Image (cartoon, grey):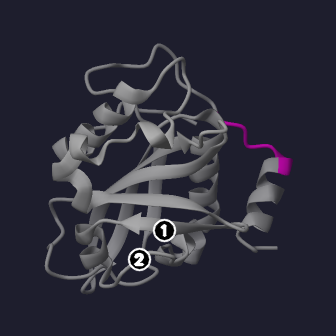
């Protein structure tokens, strides 16, 4: 997979910079390290995803994110936002964030009031006090072509690309390859009940 240097919005860069400020020795930050006041202005754009059995569900969703999807997302299944054709890729991106403890940037297409629009999503892994990487802090930001007053059509998200996200102003020395072996794909299909 080729990874290009991503162009993030200022809102996403603020969240990504904060996450990297907490990261130590290539390990995802602990959930207990998060201080919401440090990124107060970004709280409406934030999401928190966690496992409920084998489903990735919203633990929290900021007000702007809920307005964007036209409903309160807490306890909703993350996969329901996505077009079924994108779900395998979405699982691959989220599992990559968990396994590699790396920030992931997603370019997303969606439908809003019958029009195609772009979104930007960050998936930032977090560890529990026991050290298990089991939550994702994220942000969802509308592209400039979207209208903030219209909700995104349910199930219309299509993952266009995903790649590691690096701190603003840095360029990775080498691109990172993520495993795409058959056992990984089999696990992914079972995880989202696709087989």
- Name which of mark 2 and mark 1 comes first in the sequence: 1
- Across and down, in percent, residue 42 comes to 21, 52
Asked whether 145 or 134 is in front, the reply is: 134
- Across and down, in percent, residue 59 comes to 48, 66
10 Å neighbourhood of mark 1: few (<14), some, or many (≥20)? many
**Disc 2 and disc 1: Cα gap in Å?**
6 Å
Q: Is residue 106 left or right of residue 28?
A: left
Q: Is residue 68 left or right of residue 187?
A: left
| Label of residue 73 in the image | 2
- Across and down, in percent, residue 24 comes to 49, 21
Q: Which residues are magenta?
A: 178-183
| Label of residue 58 in the image | 1
Q: Are marks 2 and 1 in contact (CB under 8 Å)?
A: yes
Rendered residue at 44%/58% (across/down):
48
10 Å neighbourhood of mark 2: few (<14), some, or many (≥20)? many
- Across and down, in percent, residue 138 comes to 40, 52
**With respect to residue 185, does 131 lie above or below?**
above
């Amino acid at each position: 997979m080729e990874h290009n240097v991503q162009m993030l919005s200022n809102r996403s860069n603020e969240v990504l910079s904060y996450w990297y400020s907490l990261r130590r020795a290539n390990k995802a930050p602990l959930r207990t390290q998060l201080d919401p006041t440090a990124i107060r202005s970004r709280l409406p754009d934030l999401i928190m995803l966690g496992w409920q059995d084998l489903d990735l569900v919203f633990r929290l969703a900021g007000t702007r994110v809920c307005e964007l999807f036209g409903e309160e997302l807490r306890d909703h299944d993350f996969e329901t936002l996505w077009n079924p054709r994108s779900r395998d890729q979405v699982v691959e991106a989220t599992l990559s964030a968990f396994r590699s403890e790396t920030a992931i940037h997603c370019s997303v297409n969606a439908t809003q009031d019958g029009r195609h629009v772009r979104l930007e999503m960050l998936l930032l892994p977090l560890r529990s006090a026991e050290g298990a990487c089991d939550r994702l802090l994220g942000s969802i930001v509308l592209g400039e072509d979207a209208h903030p007053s219209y909700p995104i059509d349910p199930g219309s998200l299509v993952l266009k690309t995903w790649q590691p996200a690096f701190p603003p102003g840095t360029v990775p020395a080498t691109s990172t390859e993520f495993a795409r072996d058959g056992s990984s794909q089999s696990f992914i299909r079972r995880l989202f009940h696709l087989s």
